[in-house]
Image (spheres, rainbow, N blue to C red):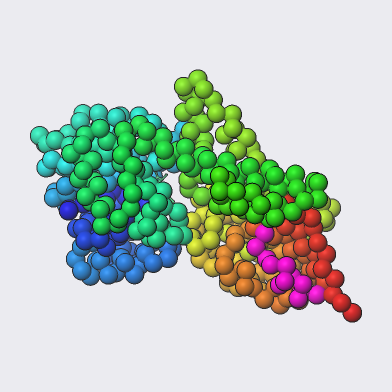
Amino acid sequence: MRIAVLGTGYVGLSTGVCLAEIGHHVICIDVDERKIATLKQGKSPIYEPGLEELLIKNSSAGRLVFTASHKYALNEADIIIIAVGTPQSDDGQADLRYIEQAAKDLAEHIVRDSIVVIKSTVPVGTNDYIKQLIFAHLKNKVKFRMVSNPEFLRQGSAIQDTLKADRIIIGCEEIEASNIIQEMYRPLNVPFLLTDARSAEMIKYASNAFLAMKISFINGIANLCEAVGADVVDVATGMGLDKRIGSAFLNAGIGYGGSCFPKDVKALLHTSKEHGMPLSLLVETIAINEEQQELLVKKALNRFGTLTGKKIAMLGLSFKPETDDMREAPSIRISRALTALGAEVTAYDPVAVTNARQVIGDVITYADAPIKAANGADALFIVTEWEEFRKLDVKALLDVMKHRIIFDGRNCLAEEVLQECGTIEYCSVGRPAVIFKKEE
Ligand SMILES: NC(=O)c1ccc[n+]([C@@H]2O[C@H](COP(=O)([O-])OP(=O)(O)OC[C@H]3O[C@@H](n4cnc5c(N)ncnc54)[C@H](O)[C@@H]3O)[C@@H](O)[C@H]2O)c1
């Protein structure tokens, strides 16, 4: 099939590459010409494991092409997938300006009957709205049908998640269009759920809101565990063993970030208020998360009395491991809070420093190795649970620090590792602080 993908961000690029991998001819379009130039050179503009290999493989095979020209890309497409951003507006609702522009671009350039698939996360009713918008701006006499096909990939495992998705949601009232989209995905051998467009749109928001709520729930329980002397890791393990609950998204920590959960929860809350049935559960989900992002700062403030002049080594900047995405990363809020309190922050991240510089700026210093960040530090903050941090030579870091204190915001250091480190104060989330003492 000949497919055009509008938007080569995390979703559009992963989708385009994977559809080429299963044999389709894919043209990816982006308005960002620098991105397109990078992609044409066989380089991925984002860090995503496995993406660049498939990009090179499928570009070389002639199945994957990149362009900044809508005219060129839409000339032969049977299926057009819209995967542009839907960020958050100031009032919390989804900002549809990019998808509206994509719809107008598309309306101007389609020259043949086609299926328009909305993969971006959009509020309920947007498929209908975009259909009307395209229709109103259509330049040529062609027929098009709309399909809602929300995306569920996770950054950091986007390729695996696309190739081995749990389900593919196809929201469309027209059987023929639905059948064609099922055919497009058929080689993936993933179960389909066929529904109407509004339900498909709602499935995406309800899923993200539920996962965010699970995180905020366990974080609320974590704070209570600290107050009553329980261990949230054991509590979450015990809860997760119950099949009705499941263990995923029950890791207590300093809260969720990223390009989806924060904005999607707020957008769903906005929709619920708009329809006169506010989901107060979401209000709490957001409030707990915002408070949780400052937890390490509060703990450090309690420990030291003041943070003025204190040197903090921060490990992890990206909002989660295996990505360089800094959107809504807890490290942003933590950096700002620490520097506002007079602390000096030196941060290390395996891949996100370039993006972090653009968001956090030079109010903090960046190091190219954990040991350099730790040098002379009063405390070490672990903000993102990169796998390499679990394998750190923690003792070597502590040996170059001024004080042997760790605030682990992701509960990712193992007790056995800490016990080998000599004297150390270890504060994590949802568990009592521990002082490991060196045996004389
Ligand atoms: N990132 C995720 O993990 C994820 C997961 C599931 C769903 N989603 C949803 O998918 C959508 C895309 O997210 P993303 O993270 O890939 O966004 P992104 O910001 O990484 O990428 C969007 C891309 O679209 C391009 N673009 C904007 N207008 C365009 C136009 N008119 N024509 C062509 N290209 C255009 C931008 O230049 C950008 O490269 C959002 O609605 C998001 O909520 C994201």
Horizontal side of residue 189 vs 23, given as left or right: right
392 left or right of 5? right
- Give the residue at the far top of this rendering: 276
Q: Nearer the viewer, residue 221 or 25?
A: 221
Q: Residue 82: which quarter of the image?
A: top left
Residue at the outermost bottom position: 440
> Does the image show residue 201?
yes
Q: Relative to residue 390, is residue 182 depicted above or below?
A: above
Residue 329 visible within the image = no
Q: Position of residue 109 (x, y in %)?
A: 17, 42
Residue 98 locus on image (x, y percent)? 35, 40
Q: Position of residue 15 (x, y in %)?
A: 32, 54
Residue drawn at the location 52% of the way across and 22% of the way down? 277
Say which quarter of the image contains residue 291: top right
Q: Measuring 20% from the left and 45% from the top, which residue is drawn there? A: 180
Check if residue 413 falls in the magenta segment: yes
Q: Quadrant of residue 234?
A: bottom right
The residue range painted magenta reads: 411-422
Residue 308 in the image, given as x and y percentages of width and height: 78, 55
Q: Which residue is at the far left?
A: 141
